[in-house]
Amino acid sequence: MTKWLLQIWKTPELRRKLLITALLIVVFRVVAHIPVPGVDRTNLSRVIGEQGIFGLLDIFSGGGISNLSIVMLGVGPYITATIIIQLLTMVIPRLEELQKEGGEANRQQLNQYMRILTVPLAFVQAYATLSLLNRNRANPIITDASFPNILTILFLVTAGTIFLMWLGELITEYGISNGISIIIFAGILERFPQLTQQFLVNYNPSQLVTYVIFGLVALTVIGAVVFITEAQRNIPVSYARRVRGNRLYGGSSTHLPLRVNQAGVIPIIFGTSVILFPTLIAGFLVSARSETLRNVGTAITTFFQNQLYYGLIFFILIFAFTFFYTYIVFEPKRIAENLQKQGGFIPGIRPGRATAEYLSYITNRVIVAGAFFLATIALFPILVQRYFPSTNLTIGGTSILIVVSVALEIYKQIQANLVVREYELY
């Protein structure tokens, strides 16, 4: 390990990328502790403690919700904009052409659409979040709820999201790995010291056996995340031999990798957004003047407070979204067409339509395992609280998935840079 770290430090290009990434993460963490004007922290802590949905949102914002900072939305609006643009590529021919043609110019154009869409999404999400947090007029979180002050806060929060989006792009271009993933990764890791402190303060020696079992379960989950993240199904692909002039080309064999978890954490984000929407609406209805609306809001809140119903709906949503998103990023028909154009074929399968059908068949079988894994990981905190109700420890399955996935990606990029360095030397 020490030799590997020294090798990284002695590689100028890699050292520069890591230092830039670390510097931009520090900037992000500093900004995350700048609150919006007029925040009552006592009421803020009380509201976040009473409503669990903000704890989930706080994970993706890197503690921005608990601090009500100018970056309280994190990169959530940008991720939502990215998902919307990817969905629109299926129905808008112009966007579909940009995606299929590829190239740096087309990629930059799609990124520009995502940036533009992020602005209104951030503004609307900021308004909804502030309204939900500040709905208790007796103990308001924002002490000055005048229109000019609220408008100022909305612009600050929107600007904070755009700033984080810019930091993410800087990390992607000049640092290591994907910038947006790094920001979420840093936000999650920032919570670990606080969780450790809470554990030490609330440590109970009589629960030592429970803590040991809990730790073993946590290690098992981390191992499972690594295994599934790296797991893939290799489909053999052969390329026909072609004669050009006096030379023979092709005739090679390779494989097409189908990852078990091709969708990453996107289905969990989808499922979280959908399942939080009724809860947010119910939060507004509970405070309505109409008794009927208040009853509807109370019924919705009561329904989703039932862990069985909540877990079942969340499981189904993630399972469905995993299939949906995987077929957006992996199109069997397009893959079959590209293989045919390049002279490639799957042994025993005719090129063209038969190849597309075969890829669809294999993909469906692989996705089932990935979807079940993602849905189980997302429900892991509920399962932990059910079987370890007396402990003060919590494990977020989504957090583990993000941390492990990003850590593996960083490791792979570092190794790739080291390999390139070795080739340059020799």
Image (cartoon, rainbow, N blue to C red):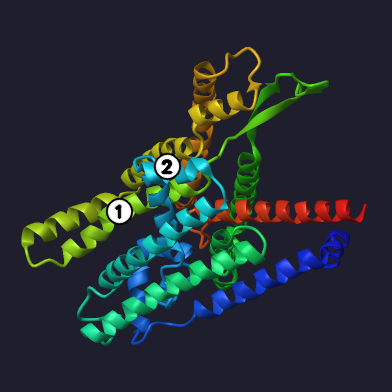
Give the quadrant of residue 48: bottom left
Relative horizontal placement of residue 329, taking residue 291 as reference (left or right):
right
Q: Is residue 386 visible?
A: no
Residue 418 sits above or below residue 329 on the image: below
- Under mark 1, the amino acid is Gln
Specify the quadrant of the image occupied by residue 249: top right
The spot of residue 334 in percent (x, y) is 51, 31
Q: Residue at x 78, y 65 (%)?
A: 13
* Dot 2 crowding, Cα within 10 Å, few <14, some 14–19, many 20+: some
Foreground: disc 2 or disc 1: 2
State how far apart marks 2 and 1 are (Cα): 41 Å
* Nearer-the-camera pick, 409 or 178: 178
Could you tell whether 104 is left or right of 119 in the image?
right
Element assignment for label 1: helix
Residue at 77% over, 64% down: 14
Crowding at label 1, few (<14), some or many (≥20) Cα neighbours within 10 Å?
few
Image coordinates of residue 352 in percent, x first then y, are: 53, 19
Q: Nearer the viewer, residue 275 or 23?
A: 23
Name which residue type carries label 2.
Glu
Marker disc for residue 96: 2
Report the residue that reaches farthest toward the right.
426
Q: Which residue is mark 1?
A: 305
Numbered badge on residue 325: none
Nearest to N terminus: mark 2 or mark 1: 2
Q: Quadrant of residue 182?
A: bottom right
Whether residue 17 is visible to the viewer of this picture, yes or no, is yes
Say which element carries label 2: helix
